[in-house]
Amino acid sequence: MKRFFKFLFGLIALFFVISPVLAGEHKLSKEAENMLIDKLNNSSLVVYKDGNVQEFQQPGVEPILIYLEDKDFKGTQVFDRVVGRAAAFLYVYGNADYVYANTISKPAIEIFKKNNIKYEAKNIVDEIQNKDKTDLCPFEKLTKNVENPAQAYGLIYKKVHPDTAIVYFTPDITSDNLVRIYKTLGKDLKGNVAVKVHSGEPGGHNFLQPGFMKALVHYVNGTIVECNTAYEGRRNTTEEHKKAIAEHGFDKIAKVDIMDEEGQMELPVPNGKQIKVNYVGSHLKNYNSMLVLSHFKGHQMGGFGGALKNMSIGIASSYGKAYIHGAGIPENIWTCEQDKFLESMADADKSVMDYMNGNITFINVMSRMSIDCDCNNNPAEPEIADIGILASDDPVALDQACVDLVYSSKDPGKASLIKRMEEMHGIHTVEAAADLGVGVRKYKLIDIK
């Protein structure tokens, strides 16, 4: 009983000490501050906001990640045992106003100063070291060359949750944000860079426009790549495809390569569910790395098209497209069992991922999301509002995140797109690709802000 009353009186005292703090001030009274600092003897992190005190006992940066799961640090006073570069980035991302640290590193101080975060500290050190004092803390190493708080958040979260993919997001669909989200990925695409896009069937108008992607293509010093189609239209021969590309203006922003202009090459799929070989444009061998830039929308055969479709059907040669559609029997291009076709796309994805050996990354743009593909020369008008730009090194997580955003949209126009995705069992491509190890379906969505 004595312990209970002691605890109760402590809370009452804390309330009366803290409550007079003026709104907008980041420093508590000295007595209140000392009471919260004392809590660091038993807690790794203490967060005060609006008269409430929340304590965490988990080590390192984990309590900061836990706090950021459903809220930010705006309007809080934070008390942390140790603040290094990694923790500082998390506080910047979480919009912290004030941070006290028992120990803070000089790089963390610079990050706080650069981002106008008020801080106090008992001890200042050059760097935060590991437990054995033999090297830098692993999280300090991880973020040593990072300047972007959102990128740092993604790297830290991935290290703590290695089974979870990181997907970056912005709701603002602009050319500048397309470059910005790519930079946030922190992916350094080297050598000859292929930028895989959908050139759009003439007559259609929903495909990503050259002007929109121009800055990004230039930033990576990339070559726009495509392959010919397997159906009648304006893109089924190299000659006609080049004309369509010129009409749409892609050749005005960068060099363009029809990768199967000189034939195809084979990529093995040893453990494929439906196909054991994938036929891709032979020019793929000319590229060291690839950016798969996809327009996420519906699809009359695949249910939806995103990163997985653009990497499978999109990189396949004209013959390879028919081969995938027919699950290894090109003559069955229009009659193949649906799930076999979807699994064949996943097989093709696996072959490309293996071939690129990590030198590949993905961006999906959720704009003008018709229920029809950009290969349709007379697509239905979009009914759902634009959602944003997403990027990830994991194409499975990326497409899964896009699907989830469609379902969670508050726009009633989503109904037609959801119907198209479900009637064609589109999610099965994601399921099959995950099963093949192309990526994972579990992800963390991080707004680049």
Image (spheres, helix red, strand yellow):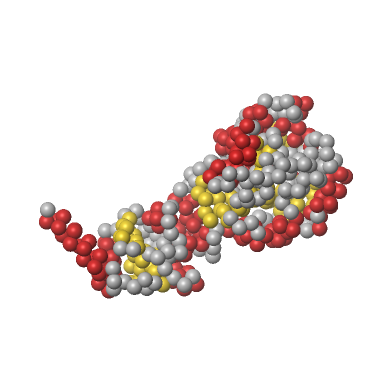
Instruction: Please name the residue shown 55% across and 58% down the image.
Output: 448
Could you say where residue 294 lies in the image, as x and y percent from the top left? 67, 48
Q: Is residue 433 visible?
A: no
User: Residue 65, located in which quarter of the rendered image?
Assistant: bottom left
Residue 1 versus residue 107 in the image, above or below: above
Q: Nearer the viewer, residue 145 or 27?
A: 27
Quarter assignment of residue 315: top right
| Residue pictured at 68% horizontal, 45% vertical | 382
Can you name the residue that lies furthest to the right here? 239
101 vs 224: above or below = below
The extreme front residue here reads 412
Question: Residue 240 appears at what percent x and percent y?
Answer: 86, 44
Residue at 42% over, 64% down: 74
| 87 relative position to 176: left or right | left
Q: Is residue 446 visible?
A: yes
Can you give x and y, in whole percent of width and height, for residue 373 in the image?
Answer: 71, 41
Residue at the image point whose x is 63% and y is 46% from the top: 384
Place of residue 154 in the rendered image (x, y in percent of width and height, measured from the top left): 51, 55
Outermost residue toward the left in this view? 2
